[in-house]
């Protein structure tokens, strides 16, 4: 699952990102409100962690603009002051929960897990495409009811394909989103992992789902080759 941390204190942001990644999340970080709002608007996240006091645009404005724009992503606000009026203002703007600084990491992680379980209308814990189903919380995937024995990266790949089903996904995008790598024309890491995922999806005994778009990337689509 993918989270966005919007926090201008780089040490706090780094600490948060490290803890969340150790808990199994993919994490993006923005250090100002304008960039954070843009990222939250154009990307799909399972939850946001938003500091209140930010340069460019404060956390209240971010939450308000996301909610008025129809974004249902769960939002946890981070506040340095344990003051009820600040917390109430953030919750009234549309946040789902809050944590005050300094915080205990295990408590914050538990609150994030609770938010992700509740989720929003657009952030389902169960994904379904054709005869493939995925439980994102339990990290389990099946095709035709049969359990798929996937590595962590293969699971992330399948999850990304299912979240973007029938969209052509470039190899460069997969490198950036799944491996946090910039494009290397000599690397075949994407092709190798996609090939392994195809085999585990049972392409020989079932209709293939992952198709190659020559010279571009891949697409998850039920039906004939593209």
Image (cartoon, rainbow, N blue to C red):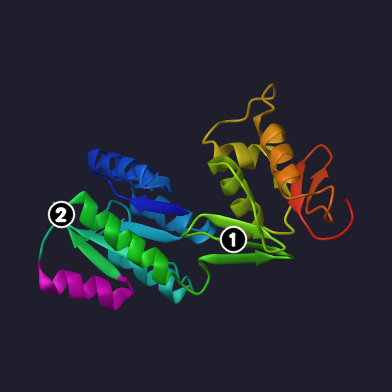
Q: Secondary structure at mark 2?
A: loop
Q: Residues within 10 Å of mark 2 (few under 14, many from 20)?
A: few
Describe residue 89's horizontal placement relative to residue 133 as left or right. Answer: left
Give how far across and how far down residue 177 sits, in percent.
55, 43
Describe residue 19's horizontal placement relative to residue 152 as left or right. Answer: left
Describe residue 181's horizontal placement relative to residue 194 as left or right. Answer: left
Q: Is residue 39 magenta?
A: no
Q: Is residue 31 above or below residue 52?
A: above
Name the residue at 21% across, 61% down: 99
Residue 112 visible in image: yes
Give how far across and how far down residue 217 sits, in percent.
75, 42
Residue with the mark numbered 2: 101
Q: Is residue 61 above or below residue 213?
A: below
The main secondary structure of the magenta stretch is helix
Residue 75 visible in image: no
Q: Is residue 88 magenta?
A: yes
Give how far across and how far down residue 196 sits, in percent.
70, 38
Q: Residues within 10 Å of mark 1 (few under 14, many from 20)?
A: many
Name the residue at 57% across, 41% down: 151
| Magenta residues (range) | 83-96
Residue with the mark numbered 1: 134
Residue situated furthest front in the rendering:
146
- Comparing 147 with 86, the one in front is 147
Q: Quadrant of residue 195?
A: top right
Name the residue at 66% across, 24% down: 187
Give how far across and how far down residue 124 sits, in percent.
52, 68
Name the residue at 64% across, 25% down: 184
Name the disc covering residue 25, or none.
Answer: none
- Comparing 114 with 42, the one in front is 114
Q: Is residue 161 above or below residue 97?
A: above
Residues tagged 1 and 2 counted as in contact (Cβ below 8 A) = no
Give the spatial CA distance, label 1 vs label 2.
35 Å
């Amino acid at each position: 699952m993918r989270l966005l941390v919007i926090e201008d204190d780089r040490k706090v942001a780094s600490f948060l990102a490290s803890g969340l990644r150790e808990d199994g999340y993919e994490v993006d970080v923005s250090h100002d409100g304008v960039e954070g709002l843009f990222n939250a608007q154009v990307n799909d996240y399972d939850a946001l962690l938003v500091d209140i006091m930010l340069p460019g645009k404060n956390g209240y404005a971010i939450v308000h603009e996301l909610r008025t724009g129809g974004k249902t992503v769960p939002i946890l606000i981070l506040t340095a002051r344990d003051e009820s009026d600040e917390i109430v203002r953030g919750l009234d703007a549309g946040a789902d929960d809050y944590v005050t600084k300094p915080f205990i990491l295990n408590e914050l992680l538990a609150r994030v897990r609770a938010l992700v379980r509740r989720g929003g209308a657009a952030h389902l814990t169960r994904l379904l495409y054709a005869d493939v189903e995925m439980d994102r919380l339990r990290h389990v995937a099946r095709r035709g009811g049969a359990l798929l024995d996937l590595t962590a990266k293969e699971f992330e790949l399948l999850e990304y394909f299912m979240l973007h089903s029938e969209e052509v996904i470039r190899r460069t995008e997969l490198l950036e989103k799944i491996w946090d790598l910039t494009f290397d024309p000599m690397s075949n890491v994407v092709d190798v992992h996609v090939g392994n995922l195809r085999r585990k999806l049972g392409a020989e005994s079932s209709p293939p789902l992952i198709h190659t778009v020559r010279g571009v990337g891949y697409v998850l689509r039920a039906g004939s080759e593209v």
